[in-house]
C-alpha cells in the first residue's frame, strides 16, 4: 500500500533532515491520512457563500439553494420595498378607523392627528348626516328665510327646509370635489372620497356656532357677524391642515387648493348676512 504522500505526489519520500525527523512543510497529517494545513485547516478551499463580505453571484432566474433567515422573516423582498403614499390601497393606513364620536371631536380638538389617521378612510355617513343637519339649521341663520319659514304653514315649510338641506349637501359635494381636484393638480396624492367627506365635516362643524347664535340673535347682530369671521378663519385653518395631511402637501399648496372652497363659503354663507 502506498503512502498517502506517494499516492498524491509532490511530497518528499525520504527524510532529509538531521536526526531522521520528518521535515516540517507547513502541514500535519490528519487522522485519516489527509494533510491539514497549519494545525487543522481543511485542505479544500472553504465556502464563504452568503457570509458577510463573500456574496455569491447568481444569474437572472437563479436562486440560492440555501436557507436565508432574513428572507424568511421579511415579508417583502428588497426590490419590493415601497414608501407610503396617501390614497394608495397597497400602503398601510396610518391607524384604525375612528368612530363617529371620536371623528367629530377629533376634527375640532385634535385636527392634525385625526386628519392623518382618517386620510385613507371614507367618512360618508358622518359627513352626510352632519351636513344635512347643518343645512336644516342654515335656513334659520338668515333673517328673511327664517321669517318665511315661520310664517308659512307646516306642510309648506317642511319640504322647503328639507330641500334647502339637500341643496347644502350638493353644494358641499361639489366644493369638496373642486378642492380635491386642485390638490391633485398641485401634486397631491390623496384619495377623493376621504378628502370630500372631511371637507364637508370641516365646513359644517366650523360654521355651526355662528348659526346657533344667529337663530336667537339674528344674522345682523354684531357678535354674530364677528363670530362668522372667526369661524371662517378657523375653517380655512382646518381645511389647510386636512389637505396637507390627506395629500402630503406643504401648507401653502394646501391653502391654495382650499382657496376656491373658502371663497365660495364666504360668498354663500358669510357675506349675505353682513
Image (tube, rainbow, N blue to C red):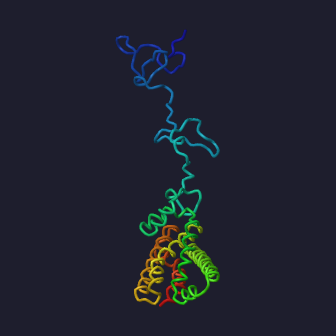
Q: Nearer the viewer, residue 193 or 58?
A: 193
Q: Residue at x 54, y 90 (%)?
A: 144
Res 190 seen here: no
Res 103 seen here: yes
Taking the view exactly as shown, the residue that stands out farthest to the front is 153
Q: Position of residue 180 (x, y in %)?
A: 57, 73
Q: Residue at x 55, y 48 (%)?
A: 76
252 with respect to 184 (left or right):
left
Q: Position of residue 238 (x, y in %)?
A: 46, 73
150 shown above or below 119: below
Q: Quadrant of residue 181?
A: bottom right
Taking the view exactly as shown, the residue that stands out farthest to the left is 19
Quadrant location of the N terminus in the rendered image: top right
Taking the view exactly as shown, the residue that stands out farthest to the top is 1
Q: Nearer the viewer, residue 138 or 148?
A: 148
Q: How many marks?
A: 0
Q: Nearer the viewer, residue 70 or 47?
A: 70
196 shown above or below 223: above
Q: Position of residue 151 (x, y in %)?
A: 57, 88
Q: Position of residue 269 (x, y in %)?
A: 52, 84
Q: Quadrant of residue 16?
A: top left
Amino acid at each position: 500500500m502506498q503512502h498517502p504522500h506517494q499516492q498524491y505526489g509532490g511530497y518528499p519520500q525520504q527524510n532529509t533532515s538531521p536526526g531522521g525527523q520528518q521535515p516540517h512543510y507547513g502541514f500535519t497529517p490528519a487522522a485519516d491520512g489527509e494533510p491539514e494545513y497549519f494545525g487543522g485547516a481543511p485542505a479544500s478551499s472553504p465556502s464563504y457563500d452568503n457570509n458577510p463580505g463573500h456574496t455569491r453571484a447568481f444569474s437572472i432566474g437563479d436562486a440560492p439553494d440555501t436557507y436565508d433567515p432574513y428572507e424568511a422573516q421579511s415579508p417583502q423582498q428588497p426590490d419590493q420595498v415601497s414608501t407610503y403614499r396617501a390614497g394608495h390601497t397597497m400602503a398601510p393606513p396610518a391607524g384604525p378607523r375612528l368612530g363617529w364620536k371620536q371623528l367629530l371631536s377629533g376634527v375640532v380638538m385634535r385636527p392634525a392627528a385625526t386628519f392623518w389617521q382618517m386620510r385613507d378612510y371614507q367618512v360618508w355617513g358622518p359627513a352626510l348626516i352632519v351636513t344635512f343637519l347643518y343645512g336644516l339649521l342654515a335656513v334659520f341663520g338668515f333673517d328673511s328665510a327664517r321669517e318665511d319659514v315661520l310664517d308659512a304653514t307646516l306642510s309648506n315649510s317642511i319640504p322647503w327646509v328639507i330641500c334647502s338641506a339637500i341643496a347644502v349637501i350638493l353644494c358641499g359635494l361639489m366644493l369638496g370635489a373642486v378642492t380635491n381636484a386642485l390638490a391633485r393638480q398641485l401634486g397631491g396624492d390623496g384619495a377623493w372620497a376621504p378628502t370630500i367627506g372631511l371637507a364637508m365635516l370641516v365646513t359644517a362643524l366650523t360654521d355651526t356656532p355662528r348659526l346657533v347664535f344667529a337663530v336667537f340673535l339674528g344674522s345682523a347682530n354684531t357678535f354674530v357677524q364677528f363670530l362668522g369671521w372667526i369661524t371662517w378663519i378657523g375653517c380655512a385653518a382646518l381645511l389647510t391642515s386636512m389637505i396637507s395631511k390627506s395629500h402630503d402637501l406643504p401648507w401653502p399648496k394646501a391653502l391654495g387648493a382650499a382657496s376656491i372652497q373658502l371663497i365660495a363659503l364666504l360668498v354663500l354663507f358669510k357675506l349675505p348676512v353682513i
